[in-house]
Image (tube, grey):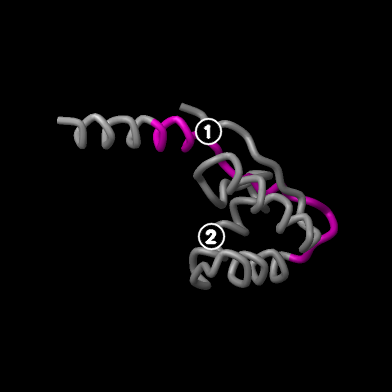
Amino acid sequence: MAQTDELTDLNATVLLDQPWVTLVWDDPVNLMSYVTWVFRDYFGFAREEATRLMLLVHHEGRATVATGGREEMERHVVALHGYGLSASLQKEDG
């Protein structure tokens, strides 16, 4: 019974730590090909997924590129800033 309680506590912790997203915002500076390259280089996305996300950024003004815990999303934002992209994190809509 104690092991079940530990698993329940762990699941609750994981669920509480998940509702954060990393957003990439459109900007007038970076080329679409560069944004696609960053998504492939940093996140390891396949060309098709990187292109899909880049087009969302271009047409919708932003795209969610990662979901997870706050600290992980903060690391993504810092890394994306290092590539010169406009990025932020926020709590996931839900």
- x 50%, y 44%: residue: 68
Comes first in the chain, label 2 or label 1: 2
- Few, some or many C-alpha atoms within 10 Å of disc 1 (few <14, some 14-19, many ≥20)? few
Residue 74 horizontal side relative to residue 12, left or right = right
91 vs 4, nearest the viewer: 4
Q: What stretch is highlighted in magenta?
A: 13-31
Q: Which of 2 and 85 is in front in this view?
A: 2
User: Residue 7, percent across and down?
Assistant: 26, 37
Residue at position x 72%, y 69% from top? 34
Q: Which residue is more in the foreground, 5 or 34?
A: 5
Residue 92: numbered disc? 1
Q: The N terminus appears in which quarter of the rendering?
A: top left
Residue 15 pos. (x, y %): 40, 33
Residue 65 placement, left or right of 62: left
Q: Three-letter amino acid code at disc 1?
A: Glu
Mark 2: few/some/many CA within 10 Å (<14, 14-19, 20+)? some
Location of mark 2 (residue):
52
Please identify the residue farthest to the right as the structure is shown: 29
Q: At numbered mark 1, what does the secondary structure look like: helix, strand or loop? A: loop
Q: Does the magenta stretch include residue 34?
A: no
Dividing the picture into quarters, in which one does residue 51 lie?
bottom right
Q: Which quadrant of the figure has residue 8?
A: top left
Q: Mark number for residue 73?
A: none
Residue 85: % across, % down = 76, 56
Residue at figure coordinates x 76%, y 50% from the top left? 86
Q: Which amino acid does label 2 sit on?
A: Arg
In this rendering, the label closer to the viewer, 2 or 1 = 1
Name which residue lies at 77% across and 63% down. Answer: 83
